[in-house]
């Protein structure tokens, strides 16, 4: 049983650093709260999402778009719970786990979370490297090594404060979103088939592996730790009315940001279905998707836009991944190291498997590694979701702001659904029943 919550703030360099106007319009206050969910949302459109969305669209057409929509709804629910924990309890998820669980359990959760962060960073390494390769012709192995230099970008942004970092990330998100508006226009999808796929969901054994990859790419465990910390960057009075207002603004922030992320992911899957599945093209690597876009769509612009969006997605995700790593290490272990050192450690652990796979299997191996990294993330999800639902449902931790019964039931239903899917996939893999290309 747990020690009481300690007073050490989460991410002290940005804690309570953004003021909230006491007066002014509703929109002005909403703008002051806007930001944390956008930093979180970039993890929902990182290169790992690209791989699962492209494979899902190329192999199964529009069939799995309902999985994306369901995953997005679950993400909004879970990120809202994460924000509530940080706002009402004043603790990020890692700190809450350390305070409540025994040390062996807490350390186990820390290790699992670090594995998830490395798996996520692996996707960012590969995505950024492939983007550099497609745009500038840099050899893939060299591009992977170059990605280690993004620590300089992180250091530059941190010197300008959290609001400037949020603005930079939002800019990258907007670029990715605009790129896919153009891609959808060029791809000319059949919208009636998209609506039909959402209205009549189906999930076959053949598509389960990719479906769980989509789930792992959309609902990311480290984002639950990240969001519970970032909401504490706002300076909120601890009165009941102000806390309730902050929760409302954070909910709007999450809904808008994550629905934007859903649009990007849906656009990737729809583009893949409209271009590749429709023409019978089997995509086994992202560079192949890039190369075949131009002849199938009819313009080289589509391939260039694809590569730019991929590079922006990789770079935006790498920044938030580093913040999540800091939060997890400080929260679980109470150890603070310099952000650039933390970045290099995580990136080094991600680069090693990337280089090995590229050397042994070439570019096709990187695509398979991207999909695998997202499935690994899905397997880590229950170890973040269960503590999150437990803490936000506890009156001991949340007081009168604990989850109401309906929200508690819905949250446990989501947790149970994700756990059941993971068990099903594990049974299929162990029984060699899972169809893979």
Image (tube, helix red, strand yellow):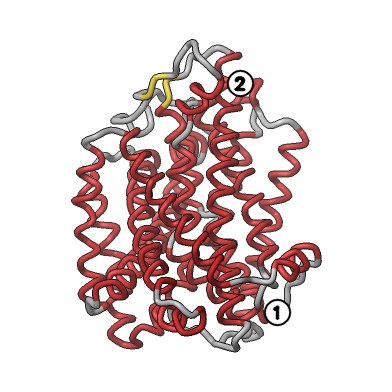
Q: Nearer the viewer, mark 2 or mark 1?
A: 2
In the image, residue 132 above or below residue 285: above
Q: Is residue 176 above or below residue 325?
A: below
Find residue 182 and report its horizontal and vertical position in percent.
49, 63
Q: Which residue is depicted at the point 59% across and 21% down?
A: 245
Q: Is residue 211 left or right of residue 343?
A: right
**SS state under label 1:** helix
The quarter of the rendered structure image containing the C terminus is bottom right
Residue shown at 61% from the left, 76% from the top:
274
Q: Is mark 2 on a helix, strand or loop?
A: helix
Coordinates of residue 435 in the picture (x, y in percent): 63, 85
Residue 65 point in image, percent of width and height: 66, 65
Q: Closer to the camera, 149 or 275?
A: 275
* Residue 50 vertical position relative to residue 369 in the rendered view, above or below: above
Query: Gap between marks 2 and 1, in whole Å?
Result: 44 Å
Q: How crowded is mark 2: few (under 14 residues within 10 Å), some or many (20 or more)?
A: some
Q: Nearer the viewer, residue 407 or 2?
A: 407
Residues packed near mark 1 inside 10 Å, few (<14), some (14 to 19) or many (20 plus): some
Q: Is residue 92 visible?
A: yes
- The residue to which callout 1 is attached is 205
- Image mark for residue 244: 2
Residue at position x 66%, y 34% in the image: 393
Instruction: Specify whether 320 is left or right of 158.
Output: right
Question: Which is nearer the eye, 130 or 104?
Answer: 130
Residue 155 located left or right of residue 260: left
Residue 368 appears in the rendering? no
């Amino acid at each position: 049983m747990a020690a009481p919550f300690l007073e050490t703030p989460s991410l002290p360099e940005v804690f309570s650093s953004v003021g909230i106007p006491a007066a002014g319009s509703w929109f002005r206050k909403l703008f002051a709260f806007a930001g944390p969910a956008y930093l979180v949302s970039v993890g929902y459109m990182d290169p790992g999402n690209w791989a699962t969305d492209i494979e899902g669209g190329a192999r199964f057409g529009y069939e799995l778009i309902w999985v994306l929509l369901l995953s997005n709804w679950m993400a909004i629910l879970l990120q809202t719970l994460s924000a509530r924990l940080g706002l009402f309890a004043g603790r990020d998820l890692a700190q809450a786990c350390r305070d409540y669980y025994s040390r062996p359990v807490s350390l186990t959760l820390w290790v699992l979370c670090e594995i998830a962060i490395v798996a996520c960073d692996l996707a960012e390494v590969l995505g950024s490297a492939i983007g550099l390769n497609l745009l500038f012709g840099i050899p893939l192995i060299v591009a992977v090594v170059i990605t280690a230099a993004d620590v300089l970008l992180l250091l530059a942004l941190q010197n300008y404060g959290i609001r400037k970092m949020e603005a930079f990330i939002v800019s990258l998100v907007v670029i990715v979103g605009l790129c896919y508006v153009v891609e959808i226009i060029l791809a000319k999808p059949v919208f009636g088939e998209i609506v039909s796929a959402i209205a009549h969901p189906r999930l076959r054994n053949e598509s389960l592996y990719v479906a769980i990859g989509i789930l792992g790419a959309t609902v990311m465990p480290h984002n639950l730790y990240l969001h519970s910390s970032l909401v504490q960057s706002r300076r909120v009075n601890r009165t009941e009315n102000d806390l309730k207002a902050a929760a409302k603004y954070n909910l709007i922030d999450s809904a808008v940001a994550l629905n934007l992320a859903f649009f990007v992911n849906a656009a990737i899957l729809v583009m893949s279905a409209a271009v590749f599945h429709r023409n019978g093209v089997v995509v086994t690597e992202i560079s192949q998707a890039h190369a075949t876009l131009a002849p199938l769509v009819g313009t080289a612009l589509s391939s260039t836009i694809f590569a730019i969006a991929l590079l922006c997605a990789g770079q935006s995700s790498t920044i938030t991944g580093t913040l999540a790593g800091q939060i997890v290490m400080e929260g679980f272990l109470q150890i603070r190291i310099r952000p650039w050192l933390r970045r290099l450690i995580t990136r080094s652990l991600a680069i090693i498997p990337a280089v090995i796979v590229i050397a042994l299997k070439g570019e096709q191996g990187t695509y398979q590694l991207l999909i695998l990294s997202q499935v690994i993330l899905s397997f880590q999800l229950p170890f973040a979701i269960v503590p999150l639902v437990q803490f936000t449902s506890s009156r001991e931790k949340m007081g009168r702001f604990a989850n109401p019964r309906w929200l508690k039931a819905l949250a446990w239903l989501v947790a149970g659904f994700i756990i059941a899917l993971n068990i099903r996939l594990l049974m299929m893999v162990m029984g060699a029943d899972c169809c893979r290309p």
